[in-house]
């Protein structure tokens, strides 16, 4: 076998192996998207009931709470970026990071200090590489976030917002996550989580102008609100984590699908080249034989004479 | 008047139980509260504790609930909890082990959680 042909054969073998791997990853990601979507659906009843309850307290009483009051001058904002632990997901992480950077720029242009909180190793690596300070980061659960993880993320954020600005507390909390629109579309977006605007929550809970009953609060409206709002924030963060996880898996599936397709194309073109090389080798051999025998025939014809 | 109310027991990551009931007893921060059909709209903070649901077909459902809310309006009752388990889902041996461990480590909240689980599991 000629050297050229051997090189092609070897490359075809290696691309075939890669294709098998990417195909497997694609299928794993596809099954995980479905699982993640199911988790999003399973968490919806709780989120809905919680939204209703928050609206009920917000409308049924005139209670003030640090989580709902807008500071007159915002000195410091917190940005929570949800990225993933692992790459191989196309532009998933870079899109989220881009949105976070744009948001940070905008907030800084408004004269606010920005505290960054990050979920996921990819986002953290990006910030560490640029030597930017990150207040706190979490990783290890981005593929399958549980409610306990959301609680872990929410706790320091709620604490920071309840603290006075002078003592290092924050006045606003923004969250950057990737919304799972459909299998094909996932959009990175930012959203202001805190302070909560009760009017917006109310609109979300009762879009058809449904009138909520006057509740009897047990033990009191303040206590109920105190207990409700942190849960509401946690549930929002939980939802964002789940959506990010579903989006990440969908992005991985897409990236791996195009990798598999590319590998297929590569194998086709490499096989063509290998065929041409083999054919050229055969042609060369034939012409060598023909040339050789012609030379031999000429030589014997000369000696006969 | 139909003497039953619709109950939905919802945990953060799933719906644990839902159905028709005649009486629901839960523990709020200011004491046990029983809700029957036609109760006035109510929104309360729940303590860790067992919740008893008397279903309309005469059965009883008991669940261990750790922190959360009870809200009632229009004969619809929702119990929201971060963690909620039905009594027959609770692994008694595991809860006992947890209780031992929590006592040994002096972890008060874990101890209470395990205790609530055990009480809910043994009550049914």
Image (cartoon, coloured by chain):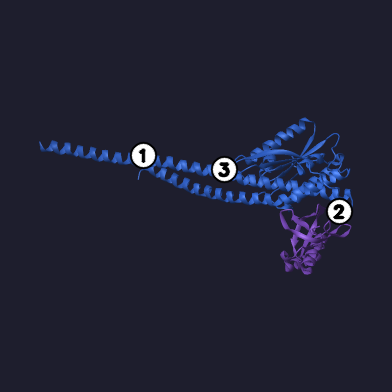
Chain colours: A blue, B purple
User: Distance between the Cα atoms at labels 1 and 2?
Assistant: 85 Å
Residue at coordinates 70% horizontally, 53% vertically from top-left? A146
Residue drawn at the location 46% of the way across and 41% of the way down: A266
Chain containing mark 2: B
The nearer-to-camera label among 1 and 3 is 3
User: Can you see residue A152?
Assistant: no
Quadrant showing the N terminus of chain A? top left
**Cα distance between the residues tagged 1 and 3:** 32 Å
- Image-based side of A143 in relation to A170, left or right: left
Residue A39 at x, y = what percent?
Answer: 67, 51
Quadrant housing residue A59: top right
Position of residue B90 measured from the top left corner of the image (x, y, whole percent): 73, 65
Foreground label between 1 and 2: 2
Assess disc 3: are there few (<14), some (14-19) or many (≥20) residues with their C-alpha within 10 Å of its C-alpha: many
Q: Secondary structure at mark 2?
A: loop
Q: Residue at x 88, y 60 (%)?
A: B31
Q: In the image, is residue A220 above or below residue A4?
A: below
Give the SS element for disc 1. Answer: helix
Q: Position of residue A41 (x, y in %)?
A: 68, 50
Name the residue carrying label 2: B40
Snapshot quadrant of residue A199: top right
Q: Which mark is residue A255?
A: 3
Does residue A294 sit above or below A226 in this rendering? above
């Amino acid at each position: 076998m000629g050297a050229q042909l051997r090189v092609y054969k070897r490359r075809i073998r290696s691309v075939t192996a890669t294709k098998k791997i990417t195909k497997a990853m694609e299928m794993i990601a596809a099954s995980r998207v479905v699982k993640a979507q199911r988790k999003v659906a399973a968490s919806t009843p709780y989120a809905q009931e919680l939204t209703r309850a928050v609206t009920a307290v917000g409308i049924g009483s005139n209670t003030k709470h640090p989580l709902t009051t807008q500071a007159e001058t915002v000195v410091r904002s917190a940005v929570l970026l949800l990225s993933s632990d692992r790459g191989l997901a196309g532009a998933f992480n870079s899109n989220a990071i881009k949105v976070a950077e744009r948001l940070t720029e905008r907030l800084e242009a408004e004269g606010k200090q920005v505290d960054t909180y990050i979920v996921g190793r990819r986002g953290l690596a990006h910030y560490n590489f640029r030597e930017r300070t990150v207040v706190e980061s979490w990783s290890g659960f981005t593929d399958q976030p549980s409610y306990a993880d959301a609680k872990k993320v929410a706790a320091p954020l709620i604490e920071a917002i309840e603290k006075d600005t002078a003592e290092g507390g924050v006045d606003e909390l923004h969250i950057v996550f990737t919304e799972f629109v459909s299998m094909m579309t996932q959009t990175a977006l930012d959203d202001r989580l805190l302070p909560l605007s009760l009017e917006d929550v109310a609109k979300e809970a009762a879009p058809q102008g449904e009138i909520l009953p006057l509740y009897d609060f047990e033990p009191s409206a303040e206590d109920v609100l105190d207990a409700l709002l942190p849960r509401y924030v946690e549930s929002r963060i939980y939802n964002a984590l789940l959506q990010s996880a579903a989006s990440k898996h969908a992005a991985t599936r897409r990236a791996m699908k195009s990798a598999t397709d590319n590998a297929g194309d590569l194998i086709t073109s490499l096989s063509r080249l290998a065929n041409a090389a083999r054919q050229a080798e055969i042609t060369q051999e034939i012409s060598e034989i023909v040339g050789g025998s012609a030379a031999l025939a000429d030589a014997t014809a000369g000696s006969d004479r | 008047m139909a003497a039953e109310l619709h109950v939905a027991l919802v945990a953060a990551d799933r719906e644990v139980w839902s159905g028709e009931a005649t009486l629901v007893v839960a523990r709020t921060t200011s004491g046990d509260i029983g809700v029957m059909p036609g109760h006035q709209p109510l929104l309360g903070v729940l303590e860790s504790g067992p919740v008893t649901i008397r279903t309309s077909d005469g059965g009883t459902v008991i669940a261990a609930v750790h922190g959360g809310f009870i809200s009632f309006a229009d004969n619809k009752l929702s119990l929201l909890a971060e963690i909620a388990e039905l009594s027959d889902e609770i692994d008694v041996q595991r809860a006992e082990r947890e209780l031992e461990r929590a006592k040994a480590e002096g972890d008060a909240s874990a101890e209470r959680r395990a205790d609530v689980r055990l009480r809910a599991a043994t009550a049914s």
